[in-house]
Image (spheres, rainbow, N blue to C red):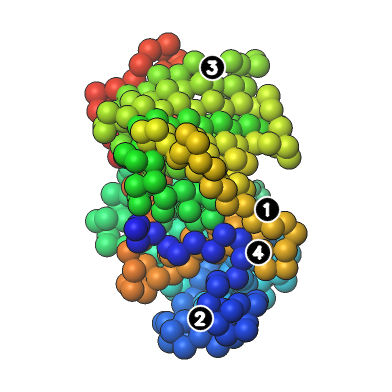
Amino acid sequence: MSDWKKIDFGHTPYAAAFGRGDVYDVGHKPERAAKRPLAVAVAGCGGVAQAKWIPAIRRLQTIGEPVRIVGLAEPDAQTRTRAAELSGAPGFASLGDLLAAGRPDLLLVLASDAHHVPLARQAIEAGVPCLVEKPLAREFADAVGLARLADEKGVLLASVANKRFSPPYAQAKVLVDAGALKSVPTVFTGKFTLGYPYVDLLEGGTVHLLDLLLWFMGPVEKVHARGVWSADYLTSAVISFAFRSGSIGTIMTSAAGLSFGPWERVEIFGRNAFLTVDNQIELALHDDETGPAKIWRPSVPNTLLFDESFGGYSGLLEDVLDAVRGTAPLSATGRDGAAAVSLIEATRRSLARGAEIDLAAEGLLP
Ligand SMILES: NC(=O)c1ccc[n+]([C@@H]2O[C@H](COP(=O)([O-])OP(=O)(O)OC[C@H]3O[C@@H](n4cnc5c(N)ncnc54)[C@H](O)[C@@H]3O)[C@@H](O)[C@H]2O)c1
């Protein structure tokens, strides 16, 4: 079996609910309480910080993780005040002011895309580990440069890859690593749709699927893409991938679909077996011509289902906190973030030239 994190498919851990009679998993856990307490700061306190990351930290605190929010950096005064109220931590107008007041154990870089690299560089130069929202950088050279800086300074750099920690994908990874597809993965197909065309289709949304593709299939050698535009906006693209392993893949991504309706689907084939993850909620394994499919699906609504964990945010953060403590390896590294950005860059080049892109020849290997 894979040593990937134990998967609770949208519910409280079995041992807590049935072993301890602690259905909300709020009871004292000596092993968690014994962890080194960590101080986390946040740079950029807009939508995702307020709606996802501050709640994810609260979720971890609720189950006993020794972590607290010690400061926020946010230039917009109204947003800063709001986030300070939500988190109970002091707000600063800039990261420089925050770092001058104290050194956190980890900085969450949650500002808009263009600010990821300058903020993370500033923190890493000061020796502060960073978890950076996707995309790690808008340009591949900046993403690689950031990963290199972190290596040189010996400072931890983590990338947001929250879907890896979302139960349907995490369970799929366990199945693949355990040989449920009866071979290594041979084909990956993914579909991603957006309804609101005000975020960049590739770096705003598809980047999540690109990370999953790399996670399941390994390094990519070649990329070929075709697109449809509305004025300058890329509304749809079909991208095909050749992996170093010899396997193949494709992603269809579109802003001509829906955001609230069905929005995402992944299929991974082995040999006479395949699995599907539909809409990031249901996992199905089809591995028998005449036998039943195996289906995993959470109960919604369910008082034991927590969005912070089902969305993968609290699981990712817990992984990064343990890596900061040095008690577990980091699962989604800065290089992983750079690899996803390299596929965005390769897709853009392929669309511009109408040609296949060889990542090594183009200097796009992370
Ligand atoms: N993982 C996910 O599923 C997910 C979901 C949504 C957004 N995101 C990512 O999170 C990031 C933020 O998205 P959002 O929707 O919260 O955007 P937002 O515009 O709501 O918030 C961004 C905030 O960053 C602040 N900011 C700008 N420059 C800054 C600086 N130099 N220092 C500190 N703060 C600064 C802005 O004032 C703003 O409040 C984006 O990179 C986005 O791609 C990821």
Q: CA distance from mark 4 to mark 3?
A: 37 Å
Q: Amino acid at mark 3?
A: Gly
Q: Which mark is residue 227?
A: 3
Mark 4 — residue? 306
Q: CA distance from mark 2 to mark 4?
A: 19 Å
Q: Which mark is residue 66?
A: 2
Quarter of the image for the C terminus: give it: top left
User: Callout 2: few (<14), some (14-19), or many (20+) C-alpha neighbours within 10 Å?
Assistant: some
Q: Amino acid at mark 2?
A: Pro
CB of mark 3 near ligand 1 (< 8 Å): no
Instruction: Select label 2 or label 4 by which is in front.
Output: 4
Q: CA distance from mark 1 to mark 4?
A: 19 Å
Q: Is residue 110 above or below residue 360?
A: below
Q: Earlier in the sequence, mark 1 or mark 4?
A: 1
CB of mark 1 near ligand 1 (< 8 Å): yes
In percent of the image, x 60 and y 47: which residue is there? 282
Q: Earlier in the sequence, mark 2 or mark 4?
A: 2
Q: Which mark is residue 47?
A: 1
Left or right: 242 in relation to 302: left
Q: CA distance from mark 3 to mark 2?
A: 47 Å
Q: How far from the left and from the top, in percent, is residue 96?
A: 49, 63
Kind of element beneath mark 2: loop
Q: How far from the left and from the top, in percent, is residue 12?
A: 60, 70
Q: Amino acid at mark 4?
A: Phe
Q: Nearer the viewer, residue 249 or 256?
A: 249
